[in-house]
Amino acid sequence: MLRRLSLLLLVIAAALGVVPAAAQESDAGPVAVADVRGPLDQRAIDFLVDVISNEDAQLIVLKIDNPGVASGDLAELVAAIRTSGTPVVAWVGPDGAVAYGDVAQLLDDVAVVGASPGARIGFVDPSFEGEIDLPEIEQTYRYQYRSEMVVGPGGTGEDAVPEHLAATMIVEPTIGQFIAALDGTDVATSLGNVTLETAMDAKLDDGTDVTVSSVPVRFLKPTLLTRFLRLGTRPDATLFFLLAGLAAAAFEFYAAGAGVAAAVGVLSLFLAGYGFATLPMNWPAVVAAVLGIGLYTWDFQRHELGIRSGVGTLLMLGGGFWLVGGTPQISTNWWAVVLTVVGIMLFYLFAMTTIVRSRFGTPTLGREHLVGMAGIAETSLHPDGVVVIDGAKWRARAHRAAGVEAGSDIEVLAVEGITLQVAPRQESS
């Protein structure tokens, strides 16, 4: 408790500039903290391997909040940890952070394991990226537990991890306190034992004794491109990008806009595709979600949201709940699925209807006067497309056998909601 209070005083003192400068000087190297959250994929693994192999630091800390390894070659990361000449430790935090699956097994390879109270470790089985082949390194994955340990006072499930891991774990609520707690610890590396120097005692101007960091701490994250792509590696985000991308594509088709919605749709579907490529997908659930939004589009085309939309809602909910096959390690949150589906419902019920009507329902053209008017087909109608009447664009539909191509003269036969029924214009004799 005293150490934690001292660290809090340190933060306040540093902010006020009252910590003596000499108290912060040390010949020891800096501490590098590698921070990657969410399911690990090959890009995240490559980043961690690069930090461990190339970072010039006294100590490397893996800040863990990962529900598992969704894809990629974890053997590279294991090899980098075991052969590193720099001590590698891990801290699972903050409160609520998880280390599941092969990430939990990875904790058995680092020199020291720390965790925040409330962190969860376990659910080691199943493994999604396949068997790990390390021909030159001894296999040390010794446990396959199917439950989790909750760290801290009142924690449960201590049998979810090996006894030696639970017994030696350093429990600290913040990563700064964990790094300070490592001061003076002897850790083994491939080049021999190393004694860590991460903190020192100092006095504030008022005479208060505090524990201060004796070395700089660098927080490292993957490149912007990697972080952008990894937006799709969370199952909740994958579902959102999939449905949002399809909804944006439908909007672009019906609104015949300037292409902004199409660009948004392409970007969303690209990120969803990255999730498909990295996560353990349940493909029947993906098909169900796509069919669900397809039924919404079908109803919208018929100017109503009826029974098909109801079935579509159930398909999207079911597809979202079972989108990935990684439970309990990697799964969607029920509330995120519900919010995404409700958002799609509201988009079709209000946004699509309102914007499409405003786009094509030009006030200078009364709909009651459209029947019998002549115009030009801006796009081919097979059977749907866009026509121009007196300078205004309208959604239109023609019989497939009518052969209405782009540039053809057309005539309005009827008006159904916001869609015009048209046919090739017959030249009067």
Image (cartoon, rainbow, N blue to C red):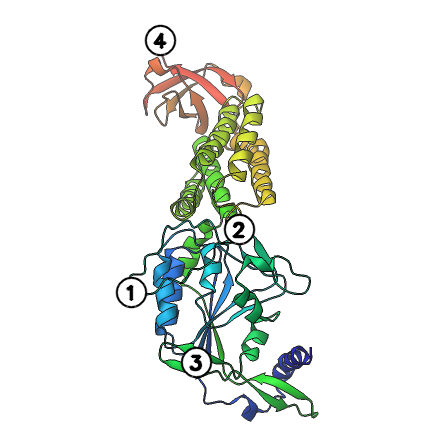
**Residue 111 x, y percent position in the rendering:** 46, 72
- Measured Cα–Cα span from mark 2 to mark 4: 80 Å
Q: Which residue is mark 4?
A: 428
Q: Callout 4 environment at 10 Å: few (<14), some (14 to 19), or many (20+)?
A: few
Q: What's the amino acid at mark 4?
A: Ser
Q: Secondary structure at mark 2?
A: loop
Q: Secondary structure at mark 1?
A: loop
**Mark number for residue 136?**
1
Q: Callout 1 environment at 10 Å: few (<14), some (14 to 19), or many (20+)?
A: few
Question: Where, quadrant-wise, is the C terminus in this rendering?
Answer: top left
**Residue 136 x, y percent position in the rendering:** 29, 65
Q: Which residue is mark 3?
A: 58
**Residue situated in front as seen by the camera: 5 or 424:** 5
**Residue 13 x, y percent position in the rendering:** 64, 84
**Residue situated in front as seen by the camera: 233 or 111:** 111
For discs 2 and 4, the disc positioned in front in the rendered view: 2
- Measured Cα–Cα span from mark 2 to mark 1: 29 Å
**Residue drawn at the location 54% of the way across and 23% of the way down:** 308
Q: Secondary structure at mark 4?
A: loop
Q: What's the amino acid at mark 2?
A: Arg
For discs 2 and 3, the disc positioned in front in the rendered view: 2
- Measured Cα–Cα span from mark 3 to mark 1: 26 Å
